[in-house]
Amino acid sequence: MLAQELIARKRDGAELGSEDLRRFLIDYGSGQVPDYQMSAFLMAVLFKGMSAAELSTLTRSIIESGEQLDFKSDGGPPAVDKHSTGGVGDKVSLILAPLLAEYGLRVPMMSGRGLGHTGGTVDKLESIPGFRTDLELDEFQAVLADVGCAMIRQTPAIAPLDGRLYALRDVTGTVPSIPLISASIISKKVAEGIEALVLDVKYGSGAFKRNADQAALLAETMVELAESEGVRASALLTAMEQPLGKTVGNALEVRESVECLRGEGPADLREVTLALAVECVAAVEPDATPSDVRASLEAMLDDGRALARFSRLVARQGGNPDFIERTGLLPSAPLRLVWESPVDGIITRSDAYEIGVGTVELGAGRRRMEDAVDPAVGVELFARRGASVRRGEPIAEVHARTEEAAQAMILRLQAAYEFGEVPPEELPLVLRRVP
């Protein structure tokens, strides 16, 4: 079948045959199908969806496009991973990986760059001076054996087809598709060779699925897909109405992650991290008591053991761990501009989407595939939804390269925040578990 015929069939809502779809994907991976035709296909999938059979074919094709690791039968500690569907200020992975490694699990984590208005773990890690996310598979496995966790970017060796699709989705408005999200995430995790996977599925203004019911559908789809590929899986639906933590921007979020690894940092970031960590442990230790597991994990944050593990990870992957004590070693923007509350009142809205888009415009994310990311820029939030503020009180500080960029971010903040006299309804950080 010609590529344009296949695209037209999907555009019209027809179910594609397994072999036709597989051949189309293989041809794209080899360069015979150009980006503009794949972009049209992705848009058709966004509007028309995929059947279970099509989704299975897509996922399996991505897995088989590269190498596959296997940690399930080598006699070592259980290999687990966590993946977030993307949020604003979501730096959980930087805390979770060393925390679980300190607990005694293995965490072979292959992460992505930012998508759309959301940040990416790889972009955050690469703001650490010298940190390498481009490890070869043998280096990746050596770091994992030594430290208990390793964190790398998408490698051409594993799921290379997804690497191309991932970058294309970011700049073609096709990120929110449930089948495309599911295939992308699960294919990489299956190829990592893990035993168990915990998914952090965001809902709210800063998530790709704003509606909780849609987020639950995404979670169910991914859990079922992972289980069908032999990986034990569960998901937590977590809130993304406002940014997670107090910072948005790569180096700023690294600094905040270190604070959390010291037993400090924002309460919401700590809570979501611990909830996901307990879920990871439960996946491979079903008889463990959740309260006991949580207490052990909290102790590892509070007494510095998790931070020491993170320091080892940074050094092992080429970074300079001195930044942990000397945060001035991290990239910093030349201009800082404080935005003050325009009124006396209560913050009733702190819209994660507006803040996320604003930080992309600052340079913390990408508008086009070829854009570089500025690790230094971002925003620090001093007051959150539900806080009482006085007129003139600092609400946020913008870290920017130019006055023009800072003022544009101030406009985004003005659109993101609303004020009133009645406290807003308190939203649970963790809505529920799937299944």
Image (cartoon, grey):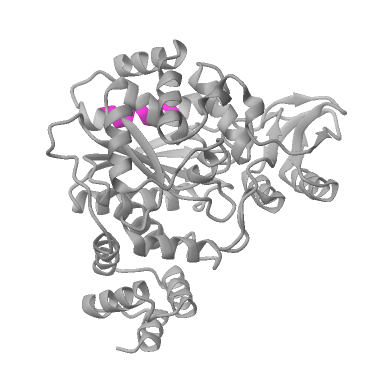
385 vs 263, nearest the viewer? 263
* Looking at the image, residue 401 lies above or below residue 290: below
* Quadrant (top left/top right/bottom left/bottom right) for the N terminus: bottom left
- Percent of width and height locating residue 137: 30, 47
Residue drawn 38% across and 52% down?
218
356 vs 53, nearest the viewer? 356
* Looking at the image, residue 239 lies above or below residue 408: above
Q: Residue 303: which quarter of the image?
A: top left
Is 116 placed left or right of 150 in the picture?
right
64 vs 39, nearest the viewer? 64
Q: Main secondary structure of the magenta part?
A: helix
Tell me where the magenta segment starts and ends, as one range.
273-281
Residue drawn 71% across and 49% down?
362
- Percent of width and height locating residue 13: 37, 79
Q: Residue 421: which quarter of the image?
A: top right
Q: Can residue 223 be seen?
A: no
- Percent of width and height locating residue 157: 31, 56
Based on the picture, tell me whether residue 274 belongs to the magenta stretch.
yes
* Quadrant (top left/top right/bottom left/bottom right) for the C terminus: top left
- Percent of width and height locating residue 105: 27, 28
* Looking at the image, residue 74 lies above or below residue 287: below
* Looking at the image, residue 335 lies above or below residue 6: above
Is 23 placed left or right of 406 in the picture?
left
Q: How many marks?
A: 0
Residue drawn 45% across and 14% down?
304
Q: Can residue 393 be seen?
A: yes
Based on the picture, tell me whether residue 110 belongs to the magenta stretch.
no
